[in-house]
Amino acid sequence: MARLPALPGFVLVPVKRGPGARSGEDAVRSAWRSPAGPEGQERPLVVRSSSAHEDTEESSMAGRFESVLDVQGWEGFTTAVQTVLDSARRVRPLRPPQDTPEDDGMAVLVQPMLTSAVGGVMFGADPVDGRTDRILVSAVRGGPDQLVDGSTQGVRYQLTRMARLVRTEPAEPRGERLLSHRQRVRLVQLAKQTERVFGGPQDMEFGFDADERLWLFQARPITAMAARPPRGARLLGPGPVAETLPGVLQPLEEDLWVTPMSHGLTLALDIAGAAPRRRLRRLRLVTTVEGRAAADLKLLGAVPSAHPVPDFINPAPNARKAGAAWRVGRLRSALPMLAVDLMADVDRALADFPAPGEMLSGQLLDAVAWGRQVLSSLHAQESLAGALLGAGTGATSAGEALAELAEGRARGLTDEQLVERHPVLLVLLPPTLGDRAPLPRQTGWTTVPRGVGALPVREGLRLRIRWVQEMQAQMVREMTRRLGPGECHLGLSRLSLLRWDELVKAADGAGLPADLAERQPQQDTGPLPAAFRLADGRPVAQLPPGHRTSGEGQGAGGGFGTGTAWDGHGARPDRPVLVVRSLDPALAPLLPGLAGLVAETGSALSHLAVLAREYRVPTAVGVPGAVDRFPAGAALTVDGGTGAVTADDSTDAATEAPTTRDTTRDTTRDTTREESAA
């Protein structure tokens, strides 16, 4: 026997009506009298569903079937049973389990109703943080139904497996805690006991009666445990690299543009002595996650050290900086001329390239390969220029482009005419192997352009980076046209799925990879968190050292997402973030495809939150005034780990000048100042 503190009761199993139907009804009536008590002293009952396919380790049907509380009398009992059975026929799994028979044999569980002094939901592990060494408890005064239906937030306790209290949300005065230390100890013991019985941590509903006896109402496997980053996982983030590569990149775009950027920034950090050379050689500074560029924030110096005292007394960083100081000192005076020479070489090479249609296939490939090499040098010098030379005149390539755009729009020129006459406009558009995006709308920018020759060194280098990227895109488009007829009408969208070495082999006549037709393009899953670590290849948002949240809302898991606020009515946006008052289980059919879920009330352990985690929907609960603060159509970011919900209050990016501030360069500038002083 499991000896779990479960209430007595009986189970009704539907059978086809036959000769024994009457005797079966008598047996049900007899069973009903047993938990109801002696005739004339009927106790209220709880009637709920029970099925082998209702809750599994892969998928939960939490809250999707009816449970009827406070059932009294024979007529009320039969009506409640029919209500539960009807809900089983009406509701189907959002993701049907494998090998489920057509009739899943829904049974009905009948138990006496317990009036709880304190009730709640307990998880034998922390599904939000992905920690098996933690136990989560949400408690309220009264029964747990207030929590599971999402109408009440309750008090959330995070406990160790030794019953030590880690934190409470919201904070409770020490003498007014809803659950005493003794009660928390008994809950932890129950969590361990159910784990032994069922072979894994469970999602449980519990209640303490007026005599403080603990009762277990229900237990099901925990689903959708969040992946936890391994110990020592790197802290990544889009940071300043998103300025150059803001969009989703396909494999060939990664090899053409991310790889040279990573190499160039690595060279710059090595020259400046800003990071250990061994670490720079071992780790790639810039990588891609879900198709978006992300950098190692620690290597870039964008976050403070997690161990400031050991780092302060470590002699290695100072020795490294001292060795780099003489290089930096000499480079500071030589860099302007080196950058001017590099820009002149790039300009000459770009001017000497014939039109792509006039070039041989080998020349096209050589031009793209040259672009990869020169981009590495451009990124390295641009980073060092930002650190060593300052802002110069303060002019930016984006500012020049906006001025040219305003003047060209006034003359009625088309986008193609504008870009052909003023290539500086390319800095307003992200690089892509596909079709270029349209230029921004009228900006109202009236500054008279001074020409790219008047730009500071760093801005001139950034402009050449964009020109080289555009040259590569034109060459690849021409290669696509030539490979197309002989390669089953290969299109640019298919070619962009190649890696660089595969493109080289295809251009040399080796043919295309056999699995190219099965490859899928990288989809846009939304921007990356500002700081994250990888767990099973997926980003898990992290708070950088020293950063504090506003304390609004609680994370209910599901990851990190961005999208458009939606109230569940009217047209559904492309990436909807559902904003509601409470976590009503009736909202479950809306979960597939949501970019986020925000609720003013509700518990991270409620039924809808459980289902949201299964669908990897970033969920924040307990967000005050969410419905009023985030009206339909607002751009939102939801962090299911911290519970932070951020609205994008900025105006349309197309009406503003792109930012030119680069935190990597600012950080490197501080480092090199220290080196010069050394």
Image (cartoon, helix red, strand yellow):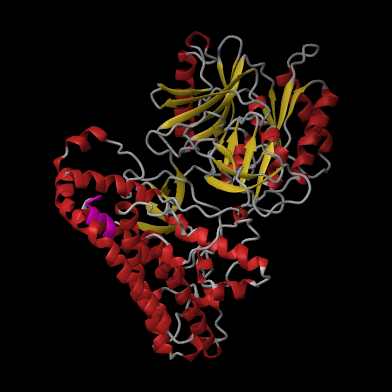
Q: Is residue 548 left or right of residue 44?
A: left
Whether residue 126 is visible? yes
582 shown above or below 647: above
Comparing 608 with 161, the one in front is: 608
Residue 494 place in picture, x, y as percent: 53, 76
Q: How many marks?
A: 0
State the image quarter where residue 77 is shown: top right
Q: Is residue 627 left or right of residue 197?
A: right
**Magenta residues (range):** 267-275
Quadrant of the drawing holding the C terminus: top left
Please, is residue 341 above or below residue 12 in the view?
below
User: Is residue 383 shown above or below 79?
Assistant: below
Query: Which residue is at a point 65% across and 66% down the rendered structure image?
Result: 409
Horizontal relation, residue 69 to residue 302: left or right: right
Residue under the point 49% across and 31% down: 194
Residue at 56% of width from left, 25% of height from top?
138
**Residue 328's x, y, as percent?**
21, 54
Residue 670: image quadrant is top left
Q: Is residue 273 magenta?
A: yes
Residue at 57%, 39% (x, y): give it. Answer: 646
Whether residue 60 is visible to the viewer of this picture, yes or no, is no
Q: Nearer the viewer, residue 645 or 1?
A: 645
Where residue 245 appears, as percent x and y from the top left, is 47, 60
Relative to the observer, which residue lies in front, 275 or 505?
A: 275
* Left or right of residue 199, residue 611 in this image: right
Residue 642 sits inside the magenta stretch? no
Q: Position of residue 93 (x, y in %)?
A: 68, 48
Q: Nearer the viewer, residue 549 or 251?
A: 549
Q: Main secondary structure of the magenta part?
A: helix
